[in-house]
Amino acid sequence: APAVLAELEIVKEGPDKGRRIEIRDALSHIGRGTHNEVAFADDSVSDTHAKLQLRDDGWYVVDLGSTNGTFVGGVRISGERRLEGAPDLRFGGVRVRFHPLAEPAPAPAAGGTRRVTMGGVERELAPMPRGKVPVWVWIAGAVVIALILFLILQRT
């Protein structure tokens, strides 16, 4: 089974208070529907309510247009919000505390690789190339411009 990346601890009063739900996927959907990775049998939670996502720079919660809202630290969010520390979250009327167990590594030095540890497994990631336009794009652009100029000059 994949490593546990985070946990949701139910803090809402009731029989489930204190129960912890393991998050094992870097993208986990939350809602009332059983198709979600985290399903709450609570009418205040939309069928597909929100998602939790681990990205390069941390954990995010994203409201997916829910009826009763997604809240971070008591504040209703619209769209997405980066999670800092172990905040209280609320999906409709279900209150949980988010416990991250996997955190992204700090950004690497320019051009270097970085090591990421998730669930006790350490991996080395190479940087994604940014800002470099392939040579063929420049050549194709020059050919298109030359063709346009040729056609314009032929008409005159």
Image (spheres, rainbow, N blue to C red):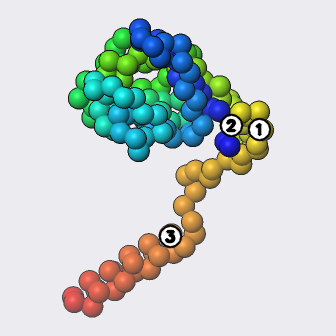
The first of marks 3 and 1 along the sequence is: 1
Q: From the image, which quarter does the N terminus lie in?
A: top right
Residue 16 location in percent, x, y? 47, 17
* Image: 68 above or below 127: above
Q: Amino acid at mark 2?
A: Ala
Q: Residue at x 65, y 33 (%)?
A: 4
Taking the spot 28% from the left edge, 26% from the top edge, the residue there is: 43
Q: Residues within 10 Å of mark 3 (few under 14, many from 20)?
A: few
- Given the current orientation, which residue lies at the most extreme front position? 15
Q: Is residue 21 above or below residue 137?
A: above
| Cα distance between the residues tagged 3 and 1 | 39 Å
Quadrant of residue 153 within the rendered picture: bottom left
Residue mark closest to the camera, 3 vs 1: 1
Give amino acid for label 1. Answer: Val
Give the camera-side residue of 57 and 111: 57
Is tag 3's residue or tag 2's residue first in the polypeptide sequence? 2
Q: Disc 2 designates what residue?
A: 3
**Mark 1, residue position:** 121
Residue 48 place in picture, x, y as percent: 34, 38
**Which of the marked residues, 1 or 2, is nearer the chain's N terminus?**
2
Secondary structure of the residue carrying tag 2 is: loop
Pointer 3: what residue? 137
Q: Disc number at residue 98? A: none
Kindly indicate whether the residue at mark 2 contacts the one at mark 1 (C-beta within 8 angstroms).
Answer: yes
Q: Indicate whether 35 appears above or below 59.
A: below
